[in-house]
Amino acid sequence: MGNEVEIFVFANKSDVEDPNEIQVTDEEISQFSEKYKIPVIKTSARTGDNVDESFLDLTKKLILKKNAEG
């Protein structure tokens, strides 16, 4: 049980440039991703950066997993 779920974390607001507005550092994101073995993808809803690519990556992963299962 649990193998049928794919988890990605979408970290929004990648477009923020002011260091005072950043809530989570790149180092913290990397540590989280490594600790929990969950991909973290930085995105921006405002600019659309990495939004489409993120969903395409998730879709590809699901298709590959389904094909591997037969």
Image (tube, rainbow, N blue to C red):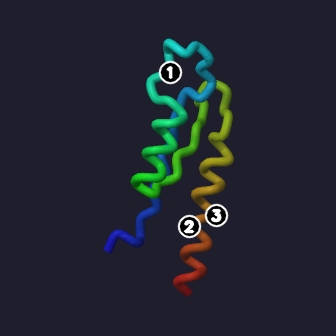
Q: Which three-letter amino acid code belongs to the residue tagged 2?
A: Leu
Q: In this view, does 60 lie above or below 13?
A: below
Look at 62% across and 48% down and name the residue there.
54
Q: Quadrant of the C terminus?
A: bottom right
Look at 60% across and 60% down and name the residue there.
59
Mark 2 closeness class: few <14, some 14–19, many ≥20 residues within 10 Å: some
Query: Of helix, strand and loop, which one carries label 2?
Result: helix
The disc label shown at residue 62, or none: 2
| Closer to the eye: label 3 or 1 | 1
Mark 1 closeness class: few <14, some 14–19, many ≥20 residues within 10 Å: few
Query: Of helix, strand and loop, which one carries label 3?
Result: helix
Look at 66% across and 44% down and name the residue there.
52
Instruction: Using the image as rendered, state which of residue 7 and residue 18 is in the foreground.
Output: 18
| Closer to the eye: label 1 or 2 | 1
Q: Do the residues labelled 2 and 3 touch (CB within 8 Å)?
A: yes
Which residue is tagged 3? 60
Could you give the CA–CA distance between mark 1 and mark 2, rounded to whole angstroms?
31 Å
x and y, in percent, of residue 48 in the image: 66, 32
Instruction: Using the image as rendered, state which of residue 17 and residue 30 is in the foreground.
Output: 30
Q: Which three-letter amino acid code belongs to the residue tagged 1?
A: Ile
Earlier-in-chain disc, 1 versus 2 = 1
Which residue is tagged 1? 22
Q: Which three-letter amino acid code belongs to the residue tagged 3?
A: Lys
Could you give the CA–CA distance between mark 2 and mark 3, rounded to whole angstroms?
5 Å
